[in-house]
Amino acid sequence: MKTKKYILIGICFCILVSLAFAIDRGKKTEYYIKFDGVIQSVDSDSLTVQGDPQNDAGQRGQYIIKSNDGISVRNSRGGKIDFASLAVGDHVEILYMDYIVRSKIEQYALDDGAEVPDVQQIDITE
């Protein structure tokens, strides 16, 4: 009878450890990501950026960035400028934040035409 009790306790322990491991592996972590691109179009509340070919896969397409007050925009000398000062043809570096499951970071990619999530900063590089 004691043997069955210890086997049952062992099985429950293994299930709990497996569950804790699965929860930890599925937890999303905050990552800051950068990519370079060229502005293709600009209007008052958004812009479209074409990712550079040397970017990682999933950051080479066209992406939309919505204007908001939380985005820091800087010119090539590092001075702050307005979102409206960005122009077609500007080479930019985009810094944004996304939540990604740690086990999926290797496969992370933006879909072509997607809105870039939680943009933190736009720097004109040229």
Image (cartoon, rainbow, N blue to C red):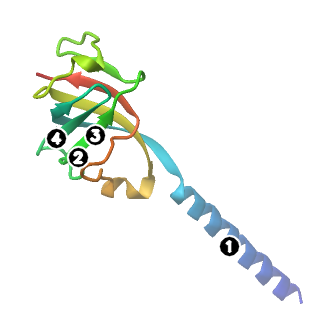
Q: Position of residue 19 (x, y in %)?
A: 64, 66
Q: Residue furthest front?
A: 44
Question: Residue 50: which numbered mark, if any?
Answer: 4
Amino acid at dot 3:
Ile
Residue at x 27% of width, y 32% of height: 94
Q: Which residue is mark 1?
A: 15
Dot placed on the residue nearer the N-terminal end, 1 or 2: 1
Question: Residue 59: which numbered mark, if any?
Answer: 2
- Residue 52 relative to residue 9: left or right: left
Amino acid at dot 2:
Gln
Q: Which residue is mark 3?
A: 64
Dot placed on the residue nearer the N-terminal end, 1 or 3: 1
- Residue 95 relative to residue 16: left or right: left
As rendered, which of 115 and 74 lies closer to the eye?
Answer: 115
Dot placed on the residue nearer the N-terminal end, 2 or 4: 4
Q: Quadrant of the C terminus?
A: top left
Q: CA distance from mark 1 to mark 3?
A: 44 Å
Q: Position of residue 4 (x, y in %)?
A: 82, 87
Q: CA distance from mark 3 to mark 2?
A: 12 Å
Residue at x 31% of width, y 32% of height: 95
Q: CA distance from mark 4 to mark 1?
A: 47 Å
Q: Position of residue 63 (x, y in %)?
A: 25, 43
Given this view, does label 2 or label 4 mark the residue nearer the observer? 4
As rendered, which of 85 and 54 lies closer to the eye?
Answer: 85
